[in-house]
Image (spheres, rainbow, N blue to C red):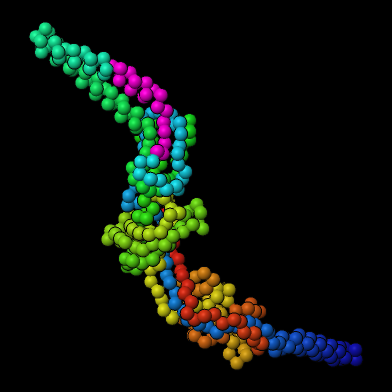
Amino acid sequence: MKHKYIPVIVFAAVSIMLIGCNQEILSDSSPHKQHSSKVVQVETQPVTARTLTEQVMGYGVVKSHNSVALKSLETSQITAIYFKAGEAVKKGQLLVQFDPSSAKAKVARDQAQLNATKQTWLRQKELVNKGVVARSTYDDSESDYKQALAQLEQDESQLTELAIKAPFDGVISQTDFHVGDVVTVGNTLATLYTPDQLSIEYQLPAAQKQDYRLDQTVTVYSELTPSKYAHGTVSYVSPNIAMGLVTLKAQLPDAKQFSPGQNVKVVQQTRQLLQQVTIPTSSLITNIQGAQVFIVVNNKARLRDVKVGQYYDGYVQILSGLAVGDQLVINGQNYLRTDQKVEVTSAQQPTTQSSLQSVTAGKK
């Protein structure tokens, strides 16, 4: 009899376990249903279209239509510097003075020699007219006088070269030399230029060459001080390509903060894209499926696949997947699932006429 009741007992135990498991499943599924029906608060804004300005970045050097490098013509010691970097100077203004003591001594010696040879020459001239001395003696004295005169003029010229003066009105650059430095022949002391005739020669990637046009706007930035910048217009686009780069030139009508020879960064505005859909970069969700966003339709979240284009300052261009007017979730999207009910808080609507700028980096 005991063996007869064993299967019944086993069957009853199994039934109890199955009922218990089913209750646990129902118990676990209940919070899930509650979670699915939970309303999530999100922030949205309508998708808008705006004008995008594409830009290309490169590097170049500032040049001047009228500039001159002030060089040392003699090896000498600097005794005085009469300018400061960026100062406006006048034509003929003394800028740098080298030690003139040795040159002055030569001039004084030459002057004494000239006086002596001149007296001899004049005396020989009187004697040859009287027939007292031979003509050859007179010729020798005349030659000595002319040689002394030439030597004096040469040494006076070298004395003058020890005083560097401005050859025209302009702005003087900084100098790497100081009072007391010995400068050798050919060293550049500073550069004098006209600030209202500055230009820039730079290079941009050849891949966008078809977008480069004359009169396009460029912004020039100092590499050392990015807060310093100036605007200009493109004046030349080279037809040739070298090492994957195109050479361009731009005029800088008002760029007193720059000087010739200075290395700068150039950002050139190329073309405008009208009525382009853009969204805040922070609203974009990227995963193995690609780029996605959430929109709200009838108070429910809808997940959309989107195709992105250029990235801008805080925004990204959307090539497909969204339309103007869609209610884009910009805050709270990381806690959403598609078809989930949401409570919408509208964000401030961005203007549709604003212009964004995208920068394509060039090679240095």
Residue drawn at the location 38% of the way across and 59% of the way down? 252
Residue drawn at the location 11% of the way across and 7% of the way down? 132
Q: Is residue 201 visible?
A: no
What type of secondary structure mainly makes up the magenta span? Answer: helix
- 363 and 353: which one is in front? 353
Residue drawn at the location 33% of the way across and 22% of the way down? 107
Q: Residue 118: percent from the left, percent from the top?
A: 22, 17
Residue drawn at the location 41% of the way across and 59% of the way down? 254
- Is 108 colored magenta in this rendering? yes
- 27 and 343: which one is in front? 343
Above or below for 66 versus 50 = above
Indicate left or right for 3 with 298 as reference. Answer: right
- Please state the extent of the stretch shown in magenta in the rendering: 94-113
Which residue is the extreme one toward the left? Answer: 131
Count of number-bearing discs: 0
Q: Residue 192: percent from the left, percent from the top?
A: 38, 45
Indicate left or right for 9 with 273 as reference. Answer: right
Quadrant of residue 336 within the rendered picture: bottom right
Which residue is the extreme one toward the top? Answer: 132
- 33 and 64: which one is in front? 64
